[in-house]
Amino acid sequence: MALRHCRHAGCRNILYTLARYHTATEEKLMNREQPNNPLHGLTLEKILTQLVDHYGWTILACEIDINCFKNDPSIKSSLKFLRKTEWARAKVEKLYISTFS
């Protein structure tokens, strides 16, 4: 929130207080946005990396039947596919939740 310039000291104090209140309220709302979402704050790259570290590519390909996990797998190529294919991303997210929650 931008503070307006005013010569009166009382106005500056009120506007400064409102700006601080507004910022604090936004932070509280951001922290409460998705309290029940176990994936909140995690990137797809972080999710995939943790699954690969935990299972390895071979077992991950058995768990989720996707070619990008089977044929010359890499994080980069898998991310490219998962970002374009919603059903595959949903399977990866579901496996992550069942594994780490």
Image: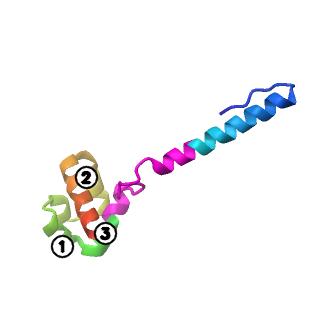
From the viewer's perspective, is the residue at label 2 or at label 3 nearer? 3
Q: Position of residue 49 (x, y in %)?
A: 34, 66
Question: From the viewer's perspective, is 5 left or right of 96?
Answer: right
| Image height of 13 relative to 82, above or below | above
Residue named by callout 2? 82
Evaluate whether residue 78 shows in this view. yes
Residue 47 in the magenta stretch? The answer is yes
Task: Tell me if mark 3 has few (under 14), some (14-19) or many (20+) residues whose alpha carbon lies within 10 angstroms of its own.
Answer: few
Q: Which of marks 2 and 3 is nearer the N terminus?
A: 2
- Which residue is drawn at the image coordinates 18% and 49% (left, top)? 87
Q: Residue 59 carries which label?
A: 1
As for residue 70 lying within the magenta part, the answer is: no
Q: Distance between the residues labelled 3 and 1?
A: 16 Å
Q: In which quarter of the image is residue 54?
A: bottom left
Looking at the picture, which amino acid does disc 3 mark? Answer: Phe
- What are the residue bounds of the magenta stretch? 26-48
From mark 1 to mark 2, how far is it between C-alphas?
Answer: 18 Å
- Res. 71 in view: no
Q: Is residue 40 above or below residue 59?
A: above
SS class, disc 3 = helix
Q: Give the residue drawn at x 22%, y 53%.
A: 90
Task: Please state, as top left, top right, bottom left or bottom right, where the C terminus lies in the image.
Answer: bottom left
Residue ID at (19%, 59%): 68
Q: Is residue 100 left or right of residue 62?
A: right
The span from disc 2 to disc 3 (Cα, nearest Å) is 20 Å
Element class at badge 1? helix
Q: Name the residue under label 3.
A: 100
Do callouts 1 and 2 mark residues in contact (Cβ within 8 Å)? Answer: no
Q: Is residue 1 above or below residue 56?
A: above
